[in-house]
Image (cartoon, rainbow, N blue to C red):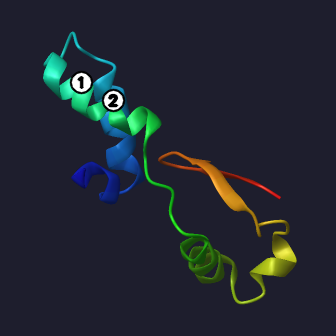
């Protein structure tokens, strides 16, 4: 689904829209409901690049315990287990 690659704001909008059959067609709501439960987790290398871009090359000294595999993913967060 294109919405998944459009970024966090687009995913959040799609999640909201999927819960509003009073405003949108049932077909659209059902399609967008996939954003509620099956967003593809991103690779940990993406997380590492983002943290290095935002916090600098020494980001591991700032944040610890990120060497886990994602358990779930949403539009603004990803949950892992260490």
Residues 5 and 51: in front is 5
Q: Nearer the viewer, residue 7 or 46?
A: 46
Q: Residue furthest top?
A: 22
Report x, y in % for residue 16.
35, 28
Residue 67: in sight, yes or no?
Answer: yes
Q: Is residue 8 above or below residue 61?
A: above
Question: How far across and how far down the image is residue 63, in percent?
Answer: 81, 69
Give the answer, above or below, for where 47 lies relative to 79: below
| Residue 51 image point, x, y percent | 64, 75
Q: Quadrant of the C terminus?
A: bottom right
Q: Which residue is mark 2?
A: 33
In three-dimensional space, the C-alpha distance between marks 1 and 2, rounded to whole angstroms, equals 6 Å
- Give the residue drawn at x 37%, y 33%: 15
Q: Residue at x 27, y 50 (%)?
A: 3
Residue 20: image location, x then y, percent = 28, 17
1 and 2 marks in contact (CB < 8 Å)? yes
As displayed, is residue 78 above or below residue 29? below
Kindly indicate the quadrant of the structure image that contains residue 25.
top left
68 left or right of 26?
right
Q: Which residue is mark 1?
A: 29
State left or right for residue 32 relative to residue 35: left
Res. 10 mark: none
Identify the residue at image location x=51%, y=45%: 74
Secondary structure of residue under mark 2: loop
Q: Is residue 67 above or below residue 29?
A: below
């Amino acid at each position: 689904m294109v919405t998944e690659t459009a970024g966090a704001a687009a995913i959040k909008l799609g999640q909201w829209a999927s819960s509003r059959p009073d405003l949108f067609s049932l077909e659209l709501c059902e399609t967008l409901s996939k954003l509620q439960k099956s967003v593809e987790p991103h690779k940990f290398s993406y997380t590492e690049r983002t943290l290095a871009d935002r916090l600098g090359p020494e980001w591991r000294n700032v944040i610890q315990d990120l060497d886990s595999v994602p358990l779930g993913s949403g539009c603004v967060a990803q949950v892992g287990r260490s």
